[in-house]
Image (cartoon, helix red, strand yellow):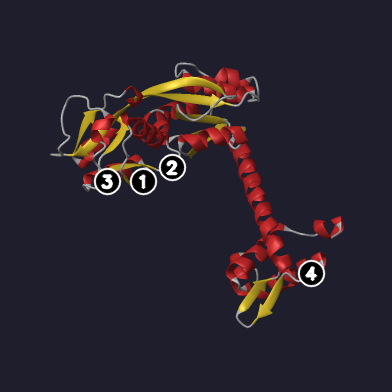
Amino acid sequence: MSAYNLARFDFVSVRLAVLCAQSGSLTAAARDCNLVLPAASRRIRDLETSIGEPLFERHSRGLHPTPAGRAFVKHGLVLLQEMDLLMEDLSDLRKGVMRHIRLTSSTAAINQFLPPLLARYAQVNPDVQVDLDEQVSEIVVSSLRDGRTDVGAYVEGPDDEGLETRNFRQDQLVLILPVGHRLTGRSPIAFVDTLDEPWISLTAGAALLIKQQQAALSSGRPFKLRMQVRSFDAVGHMVASGLGIAALPKGVALPVIKAMKLAWRPLSDDWSHRQLKIAIRSDADPAIRAIRDFLCDPKQNAKASLAKFK
C-alpha cells in the first residue's frame, strides 16, 4: 500500500469501517456516524480502492469482514483510541490542564488515605490532572515496571527492587465477623486460630490475600478460602450474609462494621500491621517526583516545584 493511499484515509471512514465490522450492518454504522447510506457506502468503497483489497463480504444479512477487513479493524481501533486521547489532551489544554500524571493504587490506599491528599493536590496544582487507576498491589508494581503508570501506591510485599520507594502510611488488619460468631471477642486473636473457618478475601494479587496464604502455609494448615471479591464493601456483604469471616484494614472496617452491623476483633500477628509505600521509576521526571513528595508529605506544597518543570 502506498503512502499516498494511506494519507487518503480519514477518521470518519476508519470509524465507519470499525462499526461495520462490529455491527455487521452498514445501515447501523452509517447512522452512528451521522452519514446517509449512499455516502457511507461510498466511503467503504473508497477505502477498499485505496487498500486494493475488499474489507467486507456482502451478504443479504449484512457485512462480514474479510481477512484484510479484520486486520484493518484491529489497527483502526488503535488509531481511533489514539485520536480520542489526542482530543482529550487538546480539550484539557483549552481548560488549562498542562500535564497528566498516571497514579495506580491499591484499594487500601484509595479507601483510607488518597482522597483528601488528591483533593488538596488538585487545589494547589490545577494545571495537573491525576489519572487514578485502582489495582491490586502486584499489578501496581508491575505497571510501574512496564511504564504503564507514573506513580504507584501499594501495600508492602510485592518485589519492588529497582524502583524508588518511600514509606507512605501504615494500617492495621482486623478480623470482621457476624455478631454472635464463636470467635467474637475483645482480645487480639492469632490468625492461625481462625483457620477452621471459611474465609472471604480479595482477588489474586492483592497484598492481603498473599499475606493470608503465606501465613496459613507457614502454620502448616489449609486456608479455607470460600469466596474472592474485588472490593472491601463486597467483603463486608459476604461476611454479613454469614458466608465466612474476613480481615480488613481497620480504617475501612469500622464504617463497614457500623453499616452492616458486624463484629470485629484485633489480630495479634505482626503482619497485621502493614506498611503502605509510594514508588516511582528511577527515570521519573521532576514533575512525577514532585507529586511523590507531595503524597509522602501532605504538608508539602508541591505547586512551586512542579511549576519549574512545565
Question: Does the residue at mark 2 contact the one at mark 1 (Cβ under 8 Å)?
Answer: yes
Q: Is residue 218 visible?
A: yes
For label 2, the crowd category at 10 Å Cα-Cα, with few meaning under 14, some 14 to 19 and many 20 or more, is: some
Q: Position of residue 204 (x, y in %)?
A: 43, 42
Residues at circles 3 and 1 in contact by the CB criterion of under 8 Å: no
Whichever of labels 2 and 4 marks the residue nearer the N terminus, that label is 4
Q: Quadrant of the N terminus?
A: bottom right
Q: Secondary structure at mark 2?
A: loop
Q: Residue at x 46, y 28 (%)?
A: 157
Amino acid on which the number 3 mark rests in the picture: His
Q: Earlier in the sequence, mark 2 or mark 3?
A: 2
Q: Pointer 3: what residue?
A: 237
Is residue 223 shown left or right of residue 180? right
Three-letter residue code for mark 2: Ala
As drawn, the label of residue 157 is none
The residue singled out by tag 2 in the image is 204
What is the quadrant of the C terminus in the image? Answer: top right
Q: Is residue 53 left or right of residue 157?
A: right
Residue lying farthest left?
Answer: 180
Residue visible at 82% across and 68% down in the picture: 52
Position of 82 with respect to 253 (left or right) is right
**Mark 2 vs mark 3: in front:** 2
Please indicate whether residue 114 sits to the left or right of residue 35 in the image.
Answer: left
Q: Secondary structure at mark 4?
A: loop
Q: Earlier in the sequence, mark 3 or mark 1?
A: 1
**Label 2 to label 4: alpha-carbon separation:** 45 Å
- Alpha carbon distance from label 3 to label 1: 12 Å
Secondary element type, mark 3: helix
Q: Nearer the viewer, mark 2 or mark 4?
A: 2
